[in-house]
Image (spheres, helix red, strand yellow):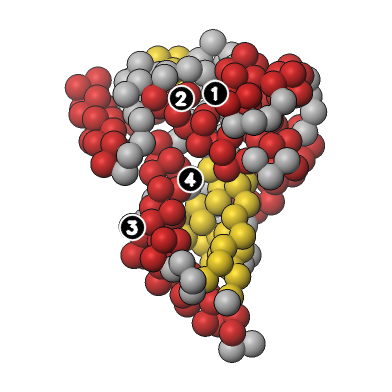
Amino acid sequence: MQTVRIDLVSDVACPWCAIGYCRLEQALETLKGEIEVELHWQPFELNRDMPPEGEPILEHLCRKYGKDAAAMEESQREIMKVAEELGLNFRGALERRANNTFAAHRVLAWAATQNQETPLQLALFEAYFGEAKNPADSEVLREKAVEVGLDGDTAEAIARSDQYTEEVRAAQQRFMDAGVNAVPGFILDGRYLIPGAQPAEVLVDALRQVAEENASR
């Protein structure tokens, strides 16, 4: 059976990243017994310059995209509907704030060393979109780390320090240099970039193509 590496460039503050991961899970269910995947989450900051207090999400998005509040709320509700159809909890999506997520990425880098990055990623999506919590708050990171079986003291200590800063910054730069300027971005075996939260069928076809290329080498 062929194994394909996927680098999933993502931010826990990105709704389409949560949706994209769910669609990847659907693709992998289709490919069960045919292709195995080695998944590595990679960091991206949507709001790199956001101050610690953040900003109400609709206010932030209106300013960012130049749309009025009614249009932006309708757009967000459409995203919420897509997410909820996939079984995601987006009930707090309209109440969330735009936050910088660097502390979350540093804790996630540590979680990866414990083979628990995917569970923590999903817990932080739930915290942000479902519960409207700040996913980079040290107490939230502690809470969600404990939920997925990680040590809460360590998670909180990392969030409050500068641990994993160099690793996260290096990964961010590496994938920006590779052409990722929006998320989600799926990079297959370091060769092919699939941008956006593509339908599961697109991911199935792409993974099969890469697996076939690998088999013919």
- The residue under label 1 is 135
Q: Residue furthest bottom?
A: 216
Query: Which of 13 and 141 lies nearest the eye of the viewer?
Result: 141
Gap between marks 1 and 4, in whole Å? Answer: 17 Å
Q: Residues within 10 Å of mark 2 (few under 14, many from 20)?
A: many
- The residue under label 4 is 183
Q: Residue at x 40, y 36 (%)?
A: 15
Gap between marks 3 and 1, in whole Å? Answer: 26 Å
Front tag of 2 and 4: 2
Q: Amino acid at mark 4?
A: Val
Q: Amino acid at mark 3?
A: Pro
Chain-order first, disc 3 or disc 2: 2
Quarter the N terminus occupies: bottom right
* Circles 3, 4 touching at the beta carbon (< 8 Å): no
Can you see residue 102? no
Residue 66, image x and y in percent?
Answer: 31, 28
* Circles 2, 4 touching at the beta carbon (< 8 Å): no
Q: Amino acid at mark 1?
A: Pro
State which quadrant residue 92 falls in.
Answer: top left
Can you see residue 42? yes
Q: Of helix, strand and loop, which one carries label 2?
A: helix
Chain-order first, disc 1 or disc 4: 1
Q: Of helix, strand and loop, which one carries label 1?
A: loop
* Circles 2, 1 touching at the beta carbon (< 8 Å): yes
- The residue under label 2 is 128
Chain-order first, disc 3 or disc 1: 1
Q: Amino acid at mark 2?
A: Tyr
